Image (cartoon, rainbow, N blue to C red):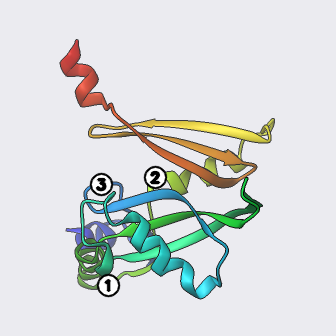
C-alpha cells in the first residue's frame, strides 16, 4: 500500500523518518542516575525503566540524551538524562514495512522528541517551554529548556477518558 502511494505520486525520496507514538511499544522517560561513563548509561536506563514500560526492556532499542549533571544534597554527582525506547517487535515491524516499501528508515522517533522541532520555530521562545500532549490513550507533559527535552511525565488522562467522563 505504501509503495503504491509512492509510485502513484512519483515520490523519489526513499529516506524517511518514522514516528511511532503508541505507548504500548514506546517510552520516553526522564531518569536521574549516579555519574557514570556514557557506555554504561543504557544498561542503567534499562534497569530503571523495566517496571515502567509495556514491553521487554531488555530486548528494546534505547537512545538517550543528557539533560544535565548536578550535585545532590548528599554531595554526590548525578546525571539527569532523557531516555527513549522502542520495543524490539515494533522496531522489527517498522523495518519490515520499510524494506517491503523499498524505503530507508533514517530515524525512528516519538511525539515527545518531535516537539523539539516545533519549539525551534517559536520566535519568542522562552528559556523553558511546556507542551501538553493529549491523545486518544494517554497524555504527557513535555518540558523543554531552549530546544532540548529535559522532562517527560505521563499523565493519568486521555481524550478517551475525558470523553467517557462527560
Which percent across, then down, holds residue 59?
A: 29, 81
Q: Which mark is residue 135?
A: none
Question: Mark 2 = which residue?
Answer: 111
Q: Quadrant of residue 30?
A: bottom right
Q: Which is more N-terminal, label 1 or label 3? A: 3
Q: Is residue 61 left or right of residue 145?
A: left
Question: Mark 3 = which residue?
Answer: 22
Residue in the image at 28% along x and 37% along y = 136
Which percent across, then down, holds residue 33?
A: 58, 67
| Helix, strand or loop under label 2 | helix
Q: Quadrant of residue 96?
A: bottom left
Question: Mark 1 = which residue?
Answer: 102
Q: Is residue 48 left or right of residue 146?
A: left
Which percent across, then down, holds residue 117?
A: 63, 54
The one nearer the camera, 39 or 16, is 39
Residue in the image at 28% along x and 85% along y = 99
Which percent across, then down, holds residue 15?
A: 47, 78
Marks 2/1: CA–CA distance: 25 Å
Amino acid at each position: 500500500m505504501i509503495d503504491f502511494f509512492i509510485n502513484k505520486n512519483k515520490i523519489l525520496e526513499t529516506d524517511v523518518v518514522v514516528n511511532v507514538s503508541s505507548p504500548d511499544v514506546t517510552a520516553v522517560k526522564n531518569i536521574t542516575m549516579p555519574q557514570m561513563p556514557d557506555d554504561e548509561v543504557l544498561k542503567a536506563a534499562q534497569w530503571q525503566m523495566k517496571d515502567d514500560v509495556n514491553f521487554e526492556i531488555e530486548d528494546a532499542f534505547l537512545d538517550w540524551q543528557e539533560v544535565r549533571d548536578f550535585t545532590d544534597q548528599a554531595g554526590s554527582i548525578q546525571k539527569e538524562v532523557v531516555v527513549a525506547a522502542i520495543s524490539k517487535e515494533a522496531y522489527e515491524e517498522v523495518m519490515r514495512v520499510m524494506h517491503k516499501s523499498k524505503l530507508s528508515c533514517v530515524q525512528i522517533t516519538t511525539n515527545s522528541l518531535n516537539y523539539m522541532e516545533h519549539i525551534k520555530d517559536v520566535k519568542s521562545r522562552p528559556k523553558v517551554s511546556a507542551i501538553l500532549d493529549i491523545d486518544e490513550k494517554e497524555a504527557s507533559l513535555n518540558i523543554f529548556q531552549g530546544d532540548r527535552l529535559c522532562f517527560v511525565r505521563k499523565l493519568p488522562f486521555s481524550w478517551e477518558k475525558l470523553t467517557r467522563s462527560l
